[in-house]
Amino acid sequence: MKVLYFAWLRERIGRGEEKLAPPAEALESAAAFVAWLRTLEARYELAFADLSALRVAADQEMVAWDAPLTDVRELAFFPPMTGG
């Protein structure tokens, strides 16, 4: 799965994108995916410490944290956007 990180997430994780092969249980929901990421390294723990400050998109469509990720090819994480 291609995973994209934007804004300060990219800075905390140290990369803008990566390819990952999550276990099946991490695909149960976007929140489960993040829980799995947080077990990998301290940089993920820091970046995903507060999910209320983040949004997630699956295959370029905004999804809720409880959305299943079955057959998702791209997952993107970013802070809320504001217009201006």
Image (cartoon, helix red, strand yellow):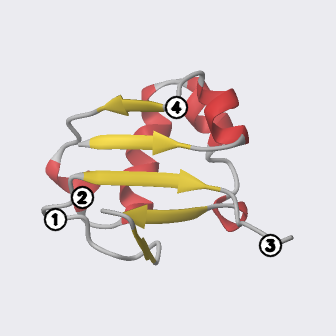
Depth check, mark 4 against mark 2: the one in front is 4
- Disc 2: which residue: 27
Q: Is 76 above or below relative to 61?
A: above
Q: Quadrant of the C terminus?
A: bottom right
Q: Is residue 78 left or right of residue 30?
A: right
Q: Which element is circle 1 on?
A: loop
User: In the structure shown, which secondary structural element does the residue marked by tag 4 occupy?
Assistant: loop
Nearer the camera: disc 3 or disc 2 = 3
> Which residue corresponds to the image point at 68% horizontal and 29% vertical from the top-left?
12
Asked if the residues shown at circle 2 and circle 1 are in contact, with their CB atoms under 8 angstroms apart, the answer is: yes
* Residue count near mark 3 (Cα–Cα under 10 Å), binned few <14, some 14–19, many ≥20: few
- The residue that mark 3 highlights is 83
**N-term-proximal mark, 2 vs 1:** 2
Please report whichever mark, 4 or 3, sits nearer to the chain's N-terminal start: 4
- Density class for disc 1 (Cα within 10 Å; few <14, some 14-19, many ≥20) is few
As measured in the structure, the alpha-carbon distance from the residue carrying label 3 to the one carrying label 2 is 32 Å
Give the side of residue 54 with respect to residue 77, left or right.
Answer: right
- Which of the two residues, 70 or 82, is positioned nearer the viewer here? 82
Are circles 1 and 4 on residues that touch, CB within 8 Å? no
User: Callout 4: few (<14), some (14-19), or many (20+) C-alpha neighbours within 10 Å?
Assistant: some
Identify which amino acid the numbered label 2 is placed on: Leu
Q: Position of residue 38 (x, y in %)?
A: 50, 39
How many angstroms separate mark 1 from mark 4 (CA)? 23 Å
Mark 2 neighbour density, 10 Å: few (under 14) some (14–19) many (20 or more): some
